Amino acid sequence: MKQETKSHVGGLSEELLSRYSGPCPRYTSYPTADRFHALNGIEPWAALQDIRSLSLYVHIPFCRSLCYFCACNKVITHQYGLASSYLDHVLQEAQWYRDKVANVPVTQLHLGGGTPTFLSDSDMRRLMAGLSEIFELHPGEGVEYSIEADPRTLELETLDTLRELGFNRLSLGVQDFDIEVQRSINRICSADQVTELTVAARERGFESISYDLIYGLPKQNLSSLHRTLNKVLDLQPDRIALYHYAHLPHRFKAQRLIDTDLIPSSTEKVAMQLAAVEHLGKAGYEFLGMDHFARPGDELAKAAHAGMLQRNFQGYTLMPADALVGLGASAISYSRDGYWQNLHRLKEYTQAIGEGKSAVCRGWLMDDEDRLRQWVISELMCRLRLDKRLVEQRIGVPFTEYFSEELARLQPMFDDGLIYQDSENIIVTDEGRWFVRNVAAAFDKYLHSQQTDAKYSRVL
């Protein structure tokens, strides 16, 4: 192992940071979405005919105000008619899947955005009723219905409606409690609002409450993040997602409103992340994957211990399904045969659906090599290890022979102590966990053979 002689940030040497903290895919899919292309008659959704379980995602892009940090596909509006009309189109799109997924149980439903709770209670009921006519939706034991919510606008009555409709998991976009940080990103939200909703959600029987937090925001520092974490720990959410703020103003116009001079340096951001992980760990939260935390009794933590943790476009999940159907503008779907994505812009999406056309604009047809590498990357991202014996069972040749180029790419990481191997496994070390995206990238054949214009977020 190489001897590091330079200064350290929370235990990580400056040399390691400079070597591995640059841009890299997040691997919410493989191949990554920047590889998608026009399908030209190819139908990756054909495999839906053979599935036994389904995950369903609905994208609700509307928000009442613009958060400067946001990289989601969103529409800022106070014209509620846009949302009601959009819902008509989503339900019309859903009809396209009626025959493809008949009698297939939905084990996971997720509403994301935007702000899904932008919908009125009556339209939320209309959405769920319409989906129930097409998909096998049966809320209850072993089924996860989750929804993202903005605590600034979520009403207690809406919590009642969501529970009535079967939702059992609530994700609140907290981001940060510091008022100066909130002002810098145009998202003022008091701790009292979050507290009230958390208590009310528990009283109404939500099984899991999750907070989204972001580090690396403008005006954020170690002290302010420490105060935010203390408030979070007072409320004891079941899960916490701690995301790295990726400043990509060339891709996301809203981020151009952020004063770059106020963004913490890379060194400061790394220190924040390491401190947050230590803080949450001391409070009893288990560190899952690369950016999720859960209380020991939470189902996500149990799934991690059982080796059942999965990763998709919404992050880490415990509910593996044979396929994912995404509805709405920019939504991505997945089957064993590949991916397909809807038109991104609201106007283009609604126009296509309104004309009775498919909203699918691009995708990817998977081959056996893609499926193998998808599984390898998932193992590393979710379990922080790769069983070489299982790989050899799939490919029928020695691991070292098949992945000789990949092992050569990994050699510097072996030398730096980020990973090690024995006769059976490649294992990501505690230090290497921060750079697991780099480890996964070694197995991404397209990243090393076909360049795109994609601008990936930094690892740290």
Image (cartoon, helix red, strand yellow):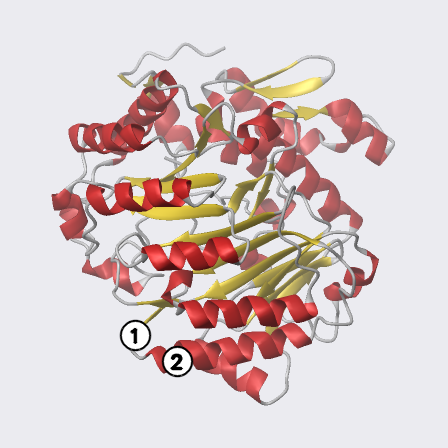
Task: Give the crowd class for mark 1: few <14, some 14-19, many >=20 residues within 10 Å.
Answer: some
Q: Amino acid at mark 1?
A: Thr
Q: Quadrant of residue 215?
A: top left
Where does the image place residue 251, in percent across and percent down from the top left?
Answer: 36, 61
With respect to residue 217, does 344 lie above or below? below
Task: Describe the element under mark 1 as helix, strand or loop.
Answer: loop
Where does the image place residue 311, in percent across and percent down from the top left?
Answer: 58, 42
Visible residue check, residue 332? yes
Residue at (30, 74) in percent of width and height: 77
Task: Describe the element under mark 2 as helix, strand or loop.
Answer: helix
Tell me the residue that label 1 is attached to. Answer: 77
Q: Amino acid at mark 2?
A: Leu
Visible residue check, residue 244? no
Residue reaching furthest to the bottom? 355
Q: Quadrant of residue 386?
A: top right
Tell me whether circle 1 and circle 2 mark residues in contact (CB < 8 Å).
yes
Which badge, 1 or 2, is on the more N-terminal residue? Answer: 1
Tell me the residue that label 2 is attached to. Answer: 82
Gap in angstroms between the C-alphas marked 1 and 2? 8 Å
Residue at (26, 63) in percent of width and height: 66
Nearer to us in this view, 107 or 66: 107
